[in-house]
């Protein structure tokens, strides 16, 4: 089948979701009110609460939620064939992610722009909030450990990307200074920054840097992971204007350009999907599609992480309540489009079925490498760009996104340690350098504890990241559902995705539990049990909160 | 003929300028929206420290923020330079704080 058909069907379905389904949800379920005074106006302070243009806010929201996960997840999940991944991304975006992200903004805006954690405490109960904190910490821990492995893998496999990936940091530092010192206007700096990035991408293939296979008794991969954590620790301690802000900005621009190039090349080339629609010949050791598909693709279908951004910064900047539909739902559609690009690159970007099967020789293989190789094939044949340059472009795109997520993830983890220091009155833990050390230490423990000397523990726990992240999404959906019950509005549009997510997550955890037990992997077994307990508690809290709310409503009715 | 074309081209120029202004506004907003809060807080912290310095100096107290002033130096350099020039001093009056 032609990849263009899949592209058109996918985009059309998501457009329909936005124009029809989200309109229905906005009018009938969340009942957005254009006259509601949003927290951005109510508490306007020029710092956190600032009424912002909806297009600008969409840009902020989308670049905050888009990381490497919508690329990594779908590119791994196509091992079951392109159809399951495609269907989950499209339906997940329309009926799960859109409702979740949009709902998190709405719920927060209706509650003084409180974060979803604080909202859980208010709406559901204190116990649920405690689970929430643990789940957030686990998600951040896994994100940082996973992305370090992903970037290290890219550095090892695509040596031409080393110069542009690290060069991008220098470009960001320079443009940060240019903007901060107001040397040049921002549009001009943006053009220079993007041009510099593309010059680096052009130079990359001619100066490949290969880490030796072994350095001081450690594998090249492990050395890259250590370097990356060193970098992330420094980056998370620097003022945001110096590196993080210009880096995120340049990344956002590069994402749009990269997506345009990939989609454009795909339309020009019109490749055939070489992967089977349903892969009946999966490699040995591949877990069953149900329930693992639904936790392998988190971002791009539904991701709990988005709820943190929606209720953290986006809700404080919403100009009008009706903008929540565009910012939240269309933000999810943006992620869905990125995931769709990953699926197309990883299934249509190979010359033959044999090539594709060689890439997907075992579960967990493929992933971002399949995206880069497949995407490069499409860009090379569609636009005539040299294959190595196209591969470098896509590698840089994936690595930069993973890199910025790591910077932010480590910073957030540091905040959690500092908060704990505050709660338990431990002065030493409140110091930024020490809290960063603890954050990096816990990530390294996971990377090298679960993965051994290779430091690839992050990738081993990738399926656990999915379940933990989905739990977070479940908690957010629970808050929205309880709010809807109290407002006497239909709750099935959020309760159905919530139930589906919880069932799939708990099933996936049980299956993984048996696998880890059989493998004798005690570390992952313990981690799995922690997440499983949290999942069951969320399910119980969910039932109790709904029962309580319905009883309250019935009492009021009487 | 010329009279007709001049207002047309100037209105086109105005339109283009307005469009460019709009584009600049959008890029600047996209750039700053994510980190507006963090940067405003950092600036407020810097101002708070500056106030502490000024008041402790004014009241003759031992400067409690002395230790931190070293890391402030690069941030204050431009402001300090503007200040001493406004005060009529062509060069920095402090030996250990040379900006020009």
Image (cartoon, rainbow, N blue to C red):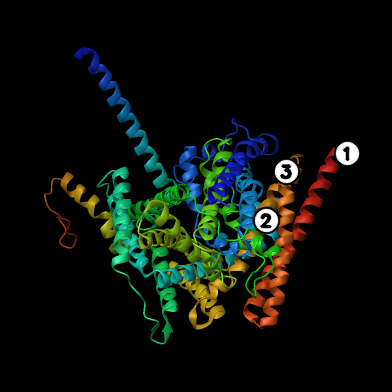
- List the residue tagged with mark 2: A475
Query: Foreground: A73 or A377?
Result: A377
Crowd around label 1: few <14 · some 14–19 · many ≥20 (10 Å): few
- List the residue tagged with mark 3: A484
In the rendered image, the residue lying farthest to the right is A558
Whether labels 1 and 2 belong to a single chain: the reply is yes
In the rendered image, the residue lying farthest to the left is B90
Q: Name the residue rendered at 45%, 52% in the picture.
A: A262
Q: Name the residue rendered at 54%, 72% in the picture.
A: A458
Query: Foreground: A372 or B23?
Result: A372
Circle nearer the N terminus (1, 3): 3
Tell me where residue A83 appears, x and y as whole percent: 63, 56
Query: Foreground: A6 or A132?
Result: A6
Q: Work out whether A179 lies above or below A137.
A: above
Q: Work out whether B77 lies above or below A225.
A: above
**Quarter that holds the C terminus of chain A:** top right
Is residue A332 at all visible to an observer of this figure?
yes
Q: Which image quadrant is residue A17 in?
A: top right
| Circle 2 chain | A
Is residue A109 at all visible to an observer of this figure?
no
Q: Work out whether A37 lies above or below A313.
A: above
The CA span between labels 2 and 3 is 14 Å
Crowd around label 2: few <14 · some 14–19 · many ≥20 (10 Å): many
The CA span between labels 1 and 3 is 20 Å
Circle nearer the N terminus (1, 2): 2
- List the residue tagged with mark 1: A558
Tell me where residue A527 appears, x and y as whole percent: 64, 74
Tell me where residue A110 appears, x and y as whole percent: 63, 41
Q: Secondary structure at mark 3?
A: helix
């Amino acid at each position: 089948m032609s990849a263009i058909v899949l592209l058109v069907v996918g985009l059309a379905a998501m457009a329909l979701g936005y124009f029809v389904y989200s309109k229905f949800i906005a009018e009938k379920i969340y009942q957005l009110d254009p006259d509601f005074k949003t927290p951005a106006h109510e508490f306007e302070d020029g710092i956190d609460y600032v009424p912002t243009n909806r297009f600008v806010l969409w840009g902020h929201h989308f670049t905050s939620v888009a990381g490497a996960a919508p690329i990594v997840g779908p590119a791994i999940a196509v091992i079951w064939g392109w159809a399951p991944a495609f269907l989950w991304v499209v339906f997940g975006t329309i009926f799960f992610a859109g409702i979740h992200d949009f709902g998190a903004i709405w719920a927060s805006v209706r509650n003084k722009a409180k974060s979803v954690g604080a909202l859980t405490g208010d709406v559901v109960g204190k116990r649920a909030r405690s689970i929430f904190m643990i789940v957030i910490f686990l998600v951040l821990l896994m994100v940082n450990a996973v992305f370090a492995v992903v970037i290290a893998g890219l550095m090892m496999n695509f040596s031409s990307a080393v110069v542009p990936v690290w060069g991008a940091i220098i470009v960001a530092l320079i443009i940060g200074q240019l903007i901060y010192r107001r040397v040049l206007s921002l549009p001009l700096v943006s053009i220079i920054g993007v041009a510099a990035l593309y010059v680096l991408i052009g130079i990359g293939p001619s100066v490949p840097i290969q880490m030796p296979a072994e350095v001081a008794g450690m594998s090249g991969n492990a050395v890259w992971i250590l370097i990356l954590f060193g970098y992330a620790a420094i980056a998370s301690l620097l003022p945001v204007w110096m590196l993080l802000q210009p880096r995120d900005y340049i990344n956002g621009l590069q994402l749009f350009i990269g997506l345009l190039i990939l989609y454009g090349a795909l339309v020009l080339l019109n490749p055939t999907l070489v992967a089977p629609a349903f892969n009946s010949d999966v490699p040995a050791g591949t877990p069953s599609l149900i329930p693992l598909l639904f936790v392998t693709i988190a971002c791009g279908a539904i991701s709990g992480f988005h709820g943190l951004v929606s209720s953290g910064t986006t809700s404080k900047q919403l100009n009008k309540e009706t903008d929540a539909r565009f910012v939240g739902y269309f933000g999810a559609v943006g992620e869905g489009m990125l995931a769709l690009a990953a699926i197309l690159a990883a299934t249509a970007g190979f010359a033959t079925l044999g090539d594709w099967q060689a890439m997907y020789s075992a579960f967990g293989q493929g992933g971002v490498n399949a995206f880069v190789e497949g995407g490069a094939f499409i860009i090379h044949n569609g636009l005539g760009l040299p294959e190595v340059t196209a591969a470098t472009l896509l590698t840089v795109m994936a690595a930069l996104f993973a890199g910025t997520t790591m910077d932010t993830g480590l910073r957030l983890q540091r905040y959690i340690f500092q908060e704990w220091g505050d709660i338990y009155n431990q002065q030493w833990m409140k110091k930024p350098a020490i809290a960063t050390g603890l954050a990096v230490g816990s990530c390294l423990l996971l990377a090298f504890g679960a993965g051994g000397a290779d430091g690839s523990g992050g990738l081993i726990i990738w399926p656990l990241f999915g379940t933990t992240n989905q739990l977070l999404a479940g908690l957010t959906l629970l808050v929205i559902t309880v709010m809807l019950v109290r407002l006497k509005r239909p709750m099935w549009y959020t309760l159905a995705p919530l139930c589906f997510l919880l069932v799939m997550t708990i099933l996936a955890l049980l299956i993984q539990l048996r696998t880890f037990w059989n493998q004798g992997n005690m570390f992952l077994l313990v981690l799995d049990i922690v997440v499983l307990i949290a999942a069951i508690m969320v399910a119980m809290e969910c039932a109790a909160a709904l029962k309580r709310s319905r009883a309250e409503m019935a009492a009021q009715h009487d | 003929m010329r009279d007709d074309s001049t207002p047309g081209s100037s209105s086109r120029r105005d339109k283009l300028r307005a469009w460019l202004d709009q584009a600049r506004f959008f890029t600047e907003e996209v750039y700053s929206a994510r980190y507006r809060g963090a940067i405003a807080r950092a600036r407020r912290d810097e101002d708070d420290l500056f106030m502490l310095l000024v008041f402790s100096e004014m009241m003759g107290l031992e400067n409690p923020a002395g230790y931190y002033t070293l890391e402030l130096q690069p941030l204050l350099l431009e402001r300090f330079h503007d200040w001493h020039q406004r005060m009529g001093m062509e060069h920095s009056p402090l030996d250990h704080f040379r900006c020009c």
